[in-house]
Amino acid sequence: QVQLVESGGGLVQTGGSLRLSCAASRYISSINAMGWYRQAPGKQRELVAVSMITGSTNYADSVKGRFTISRASAENSVYLQMNNLKPEDTAVYYCNVKVLRAKGFEDYWGQGTQVTVSS
């Protein structure tokens, strides 16, 4: 079974930076997209950024211009560079890999990494 291992979370002050990393435990075929979601206490999980197999990327409006998603396709890895962090970015960040199978899309999730931004 494929596992997604995340790293790079932590505590940072407002305006600081963090870089999240996510690597798959083994090769994953038929990847459609790799991305990052986050969930703050009491809130629903939301999309932060996604990198499609086509090369296009999408970002939540709240992080545009501050966060950058990148991929190392050969390694089935995805990264999230987060700059100018704000207290409202505090959340558990989850790596996601979306795979297109014959029966439809299948999602893989990481265990989550905590990002805390202090004011």
Image: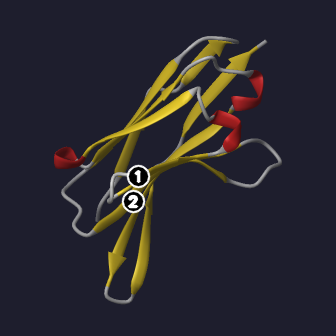
Helix, strand, or loop for circle 2?
strand
Residue 39 rendering spot, x and y as whole percentages: 68, 46
Separation of disc 1 and disc 2 at Cα? 10 Å
Please give the count of numbered marks on the rendered protein: 2
Answer few, some or many: residues within 10 Å of disc 1's Cα (few below 14, many 20 plus, some between 14 and 19): few
Q: Is residue 10 above or below residue 99?
A: above
Q: Which residue is pictured at 36% across the width and 50% down the height?
A: 4
Query: Which colouring convention does the figure follow?
Result: secondary structure
As drawn, which residue projects farthest toward the bottom?
103
Q: Which mark is residue 36?
A: none
The amino acid pointed to by label 2 is Ala
Q: Which residue is pictured at 33% across the width and 55% down the height?
A: 3
Residue on which the image places disc 2: 33
Residue 88 rendering spot, x and y as whole percentages: 77, 29
Q: Is residue 115 above or below residue 35?
A: above
For the C terminus, which image quadrant? Answer: top right
Q: Does 52 sit left or right of 16 as displayed? A: left
Residue 78 rendering spot, x and y as whole percentages: 35, 42
Answer few, some or many: residues within 10 Å of disc 2's Cα (few below 14, many 20 plus, some between 14 and 19): some
Helix, strand, or loop for circle 1?
loop
Q: Which residue is pictured at 72% across the width and 21% down the height?
A: 86
The amino acid pointed to by label 1 is Ser
Residue on which the image places disc 1: 56
Q: Does 91 sit left or right of 31 as displayed? A: right
Upstream in the sequence, badge 1 or badge 2? Answer: 2
Displayed quadrant of residue 41:
top right
Residue 104 rendering spot, x and y as whole percentages: 41, 84
For the N terminus, which image quadrant? Answer: bottom left
Residue sitting nearer the eye, 3 or 72: 72
Residue sitting nearer the eye, 11 or 62: 62
